[in-house]
Image (tube, rainbow, N blue to C red):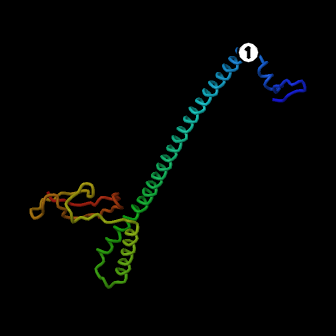
Amino acid sequence: MTKEKDGKSKAPAACENAQSAPENPESVQTGGEELSEKIKELQTKAEELEAQKKQEHELLLRTAAEYDNYRKRTSDEMSRKRADGKAEAVEKFLTVADSIKMALSVADDENDPVHKGIKLIAKQLSDTLAALGVTEIPTDIPFDPNLHNAVMHAEDETKGEGEIVEVFAAGYRMGDRVLRHSMVKVAN
C-alpha cells in the first residue's frame, strides 16, 4: 500500500473495485446453467458423432468383406471357366487319339514309313496331352463306375467279378475331372 500526503494509506484500485462490486448470485447461477446446458449439448453431439463414426466404420468393414468375397468368387469362377474351356478343347482331340491308335493297330509292317510316321504322331499327341495334365484312365484295376462305362458283360470263370475283360475305348481324365469314361467289357 502507498501512503498519501495526509498519511492515509491508499488501497489499490482493483481491490476497491472488487470489494465495491455487488455480487449478483442470479447472474452467476444463470451463467452456470447456460454453461451446463452447453456442455450437455456438446456431449450429446459428441455421442451422436461417435455413433455415426461407428456405423460408418462397420459399413466400411462390411463393404471391404463383400469386395473380398466378390474378388474370390470371380477368381474361382475364372479358374473354373478356364478349366472347362481347356477340358472342352482336349475332349475334341480324344477322337483323334482313338483314330491314331486304331491306325497303329491296323498297320502290320513296323518298317513301313507310314507306320513310323503314325507312331511319331501318336507320340507327339501323347506328349501334348500329358503336358496338359491329361492321363489315360487305367483299366488294370477293378471296374469303377466313376471311371469306367460297362457297355458289355461277360460270363468268364477265369476272371473275378467286376474285373475288366476288354477295353473298347480308352478313357481320359484331367486331374480329378473325367473327360471321357473308359468303355469296357466287365466280367460277372
Splitting the image into 4 quarters, where does residue 166 fall? Answer: bottom left
Q: Which of 54 and 129 is in front in this view?
A: 54
Q: Residue 33: percent from the left, percent from the top? A: 66, 19
Up-down relation of residue 26 to residue 73 (above or below): above
Left or right placement of residue 166 versus residue 85 in this view: left
Q: Nearer the viewer, residue 50 or 56?
A: 50
Splitting the image into 4 quarters, where does residue 7 fall? Answer: top right
Left or right placement of residue 138 versus residue 61 in this view: left
Q: How crowded is mark 1: few (under 14 residues within 10 Å), some or many (20 or more)?
A: few
Left or right placement of residue 65 versus residue 116 in this view: right
SS assignment at label 1 = loop
Q: Nearer the viewer, residue 116 or 20?
A: 20
Up-down relation of residue 101 to residue 186 (above or below): below
Up-down relation of residue 120 to residue 32 (above or below): below
Q: Which amino acid does label 1 sit on?
A: Asn
Q: At x 19% / y 62%, what residue is drawn?
A: 164
Q: At x 61% / y 28%, what residue is drawn?
A: 43
Outermost residue on the bottom side: it is 111
Outermost residue on the right side: it is 5
Q: Residue 91: percent from the left, percent from the top? A: 39, 61
Give the residue at mark 1.
Answer: 24
Q: Residue 65: percent from the left, percent from the top? A: 49, 44
Q: At x 64% / y 26%, what residue is drawn?
A: 39
Image quadrant containing the N terminus: top right
Outermost residue on the left side: it is 157
